[in-house]
Image (cartoon, helix red, strand yellow):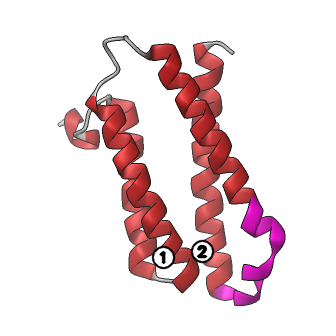
Amino acid sequence: MDYSALKHSHMGLAYLSIMLFVARFVLFSAKPDFRNNKILKILPHVIDTFLLIFAFMLLHNIWGSPVVGWWIVAKIVGLVAYIGFGVVAIKRGSLPAFAGSLICFAYIFGAAKAHSVLSWLAYL
C-alpha cells in the first residue's frame, strides 16, 4: 500500500475511533444496558487494532525521513493517555475522564497536523 492510501486509511480510522468512542459514552450514559452489547464491546478493539497497524505501516514507510521525530513519540504518549482516560470514561461513566480523552485526542490530532510536540500551539 502506498503512503497516501496508508495515511488516509489511518486518518479515517482515527475519525471513526473517536466518533465511536463519543457515541458509546453517550449511549452507555443514557442506556447502561448497552454495555453488554457484543458489537459495541468488540468493534472499538477491531478499529483501534487496524488504526495501530496502519500507524506502524506509516512509520515504517517514513522511517529515516526528516519528518520523523519527537512528534511521533508525543502521539504515542498521547495515545496511551487517551486509552487510559477512555477506559475510565467508558467503565465508570466519568465525565472528567471523557473530557480528558477528548483533550488527548485533540492533542494527538494537532501533533499529527503540525508535526510538532507542541501540537496546536505550533501554529501560534
Residue indicated by mark 2: 25
In the image, is 30 to the left or to the right of 33? Answer: left
Instruction: Choose mark 1 or mark 2, whichever is in front.
Output: 1
Please tell me which residue is depicted at 62% across the width and 35% down the height of the picture: 53
Q: Secondary structure at mark 2?
A: helix
Q: Which residue corresponds to mark 1?
A: 88
Q: Nearer the viewer, residue 70 or 110?
A: 70
Q: Which residues are magenta?
A: 30-42
Q: Is residue 101 above or below residue 11?
A: below
Label 2 environment density (alpha carbons within 10 Å; few <14, some 14–19, many ≥20): many
Q: Foreground residue, 65 or 13?
A: 65
Which secondary structure class fits the magenta region best?
A: helix
Q: Is 109 located above or below residue 39 in the figure? A: above
Quarter of the image that includes the C terminus: top left
x and y percentages locating residue 61 in the rendered image: 52, 15
Q: Amino acid at mark 1?
A: Val
Rendered image quadrant of residue 51? top right
Q: Given contact means CB atoms under 8 Å apart, are the residues at marks 1 and 2 in contact?
A: no
Q: Amino acid at mark 2?
A: Phe
The quarter of the picture where residue 99 lies is bottom left
Residue 105 in sight here: no
Residue 84 shows in the view: yes
Residue located at (23% from left, 34% from top): 123
Q: Is residue 122 magenta?
A: no
Label located before the other in sequence (1 or 2): 2
User: Quadrant location of residue 28?
Assistant: bottom right
Q: Position of residue 110 (x, y in %)?
A: 35, 41
Tell me where residue 109 appears, x and y as whole percent. Answer: 42, 42
Which residue lies most toward the right here? 38
